[in-house]
Image (cartoon, rainbow, N blue to C red):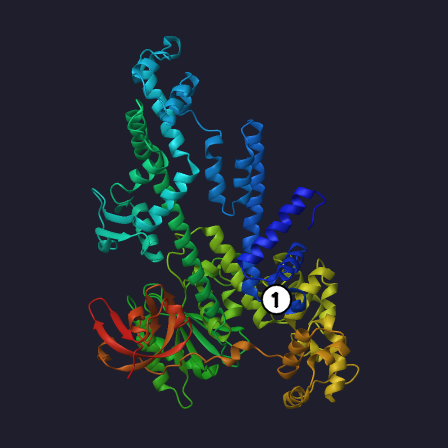
Amino acid sequence: MVSSDSTTLVNENWIIEQAAAELKLRTASARNALELLDEGATIPFISRYRKEVTGNLDEEQLRQLEKRVTYLRQLSRRKQEIVASIEQQGKLTAELKAAIEKAVILQEIEDLYLPYRPKRHTRATAAREKGLEPLANLILSQKTFNGKPGDYAAKFINPEKGVDSGETALSGARDIVAEQVAEDANLRRELRQLFLKQASFSAMLAKGAKDEEGKYQQYYDYAEPVAKIPPHRILAINRGESEEALKVNLALPPGVAEKAAAYNYPADSRCIFRTELETAIADSLKRLLIPSLQNEVRAALTEQAEAHAIKIFAANLRQLLLQPPLRGMAVLGIDPGFRTGCKVAVIDTTGKPIANLNIYPHEPKNDWEGSKKILLELTKRFKVNVFAIGNGTASRETEMLVAEVIAACPEPKPSYVIVSEAGASVYSASELARKEFPDLDVTQRGNISIARRLQDPLAELVKVEPKAIGVGLYQHDVDQKTLGQTLDAVVESCVNYVGVNLNTASSALLRYVSGINRKVADSIVTYRETKGSFKTRRELLKVPGLGEKAFEQAAGFLKIPDGTNPLDNTFVHPESYEAATKLLSLVGLGNSKATTLPSAVAVKEFRSKLKSVDEIARQLGVGALTLSDILDDLEKPGRDPRDELPKPILRNDVLKLQDLKPGMVLKGTVRNVIDFGAFVDIGLKQDGLVHITEMSNRFIKHPLDVVQVGQIIEVKVLGIDEKRGRVSLSMKLP
């Protein structure tokens, strides 16, 4: 990581120290973590297995560190490029170089570089070519008190260069002054801050625009201070503008920009060029500076809003992926539809499809009784425990059909769950789906995905592009590259947090395991299919393309429930097996080959008697944090952290909109959390909305402070809008 180049060395040291200071981390911890990242270690691996090295930095801290260091490295490279460019022009001063080196924000150095940046042919460059810069300097200096502007301007008349009069000369000089004012780093910084603190953001219906659905009705006559506008409104207005429905403006209060410019470029009442300076400043503000800063500030606001939206999306996605699986249940999945029918799939307790067909209970065929008979037969034949109904078109009608089927079933009756089918169609048409089900039509794959999402949400949802899962707002409006990278990191984090069964995981799931890429994941599956199940983790080294480095990164997250070594079914890393085996001997229930693991009671008893973790850790040759993790894993081998969460609400009968009454208290599942509230599934086709003001009796900054996707909550019905199918809910219960 450290280059022999002394300049690079100084920059890298500064980068690490700066990032550590900003994130309130120990410099040594940041440096060690960066070395591991630069060597190719993944964040889940570092967070889990290198705690002593990093001072126990968690995943979030490591991701923030990686992001900030990437930015600062880019900043450092850009500083070097800018200094070299200005130096090449012969215009680099010690003061300017110091200002560039001191900057910690990219915008700051770009402001400093602006006057020296090679630019297209402007009015100012044309004026300089005509030799009018000395006249511009006279205007700027404000130190000429005798004579008339025309007398000085006459000296610059040169018909050959297109300066045929004194006024032409003054006009060109004003252009130079206007550009210099517009490129003044201090003034730009001051005005930028004024925009962020005092500007107003406004929108109105664009001339000739047609917003027939009234999507942007609230913005037809809208104005709000920039300092107060929430991120989701920025994105909504941006979308309205891009669809040419809205006309948007960003403006400072009258006189604010003029006052700031006059302060930075004071005009002397005694100077004969006072009017020229004031005219040039007014031109600079109107033609150059204000439009430029409006674009900059809007871009900054959009970037902040997008970052916020991506953060919310990521938080929602994590909770969705970590929903508890319904193990050991046969599931009947239904992808509802009208004209094309409902696609039905039954999967056994292992997720294997054992039936796949279509029924046509709705228009135009209306084979309700025939469809009901088929579902009853499937339920009895395959001992179906639960129905998974997709929440798309015809979901409500299909739910009623399933309720009738359940009512006709003998005890114990199955239940049903409405499952989000977001991304199911994307998966159905994917290369992965074609490989999994080559003999099935694209329309017959989505129902299998819907059913499997109930059995194991994480294992199934990793097959879908994360942004298609639909647990956010404006995901199609934000920077797609950043969104993709952020959501991929969330999936990676979740997969490694839960761990993966090496002998059953799909290639789509394996590729998110630390150290494993798509090609190696495919190789693991191929090896498994040809050689049989893995018996030990070390056998992974026989997989083509999987070397020692990948093994180090991946092994601890890949579990083998029925392997020859019980430690292979824990998060204990193979590098710690020797220490774990010694520990088993200390506990009293292990042996040198670690063929058995102690009971949870024995481990708890051992921990309760431990007087010095550090002393035992030294005996075992590991750190105290690693020892603590080993004890956790021995206490709960094969643990899936999702199992500790509440299972989804299983329903037996349909709740109709007409059944609702204000004041009713119901249980529901949070489906999506956005800036202004949360959508909750209470058993209706449409989710109800709990507005942020109805989430708590105390002030809350964001709904995520109170609820998360998948959480089961009690809500009270506030109001029902039958015409629009909307229900407003409250979490403020008596």
Relative to 721, is 576 on the left or the right?
right
- Compare residues 505 and 622 and report the one nearer the observer: 622
Please name the residue shown 55% across and 60% down the image. 63
Relative to 183, is 577 on the left or the right?
right
Q: Which residue is mark 1?
A: 47
Asked whether residue 239 appears in the rendered view, the answer is no
- Compare residues 388 and 375 and report the one nearer the observer: 388
Relative to 590, is 131 on the left or the right?
left
Q: Position of residue 490 (x, y in %)?
A: 52, 63
How many marks the image carries: the answer is 1
Relative to 25, is 127 on the left or the right?
left
Q: Quadrant of residue 596?
A: bottom right
Q: Quadrant of residue 308?
A: bottom left
Q: Position of residue 166 (x, y in %)?
A: 31, 14
Q: Quadrant of residue 516?
A: bottom right
For badge 1, the amino acid type reads Ser
Q: Is residue 144 above or below residue 504?
A: above
Q: Is residue 376 above or below residue 458?
A: below
Please name the residue shown 66% across and 70% down the image. 556
Q: Residues within 10 Å of mark 1 (few under 14, many from 20)?
A: many
Q: Position of residue 480 (x, y in %)?
A: 46, 51
Please name the residue shown 28% across and 26% down the image. 275
Q: Quadrant of the C terminus?
A: bottom left
Q: Position of residue 3 (x, y in %)?
A: 70, 46
User: Which residue is most to the right?
Assistant: 592
Q: Is residue 61 above or below residue 234?
A: below
- Compare residues 559 and 76 and report the one nearer the observer: 76
Q: Is residue 577 above or below residue 81?
A: below
Asked whether residue 541 appears in the rendered view, the answer is yes
Q: Is label 1 in a helix, a strand or a loop?
A: helix
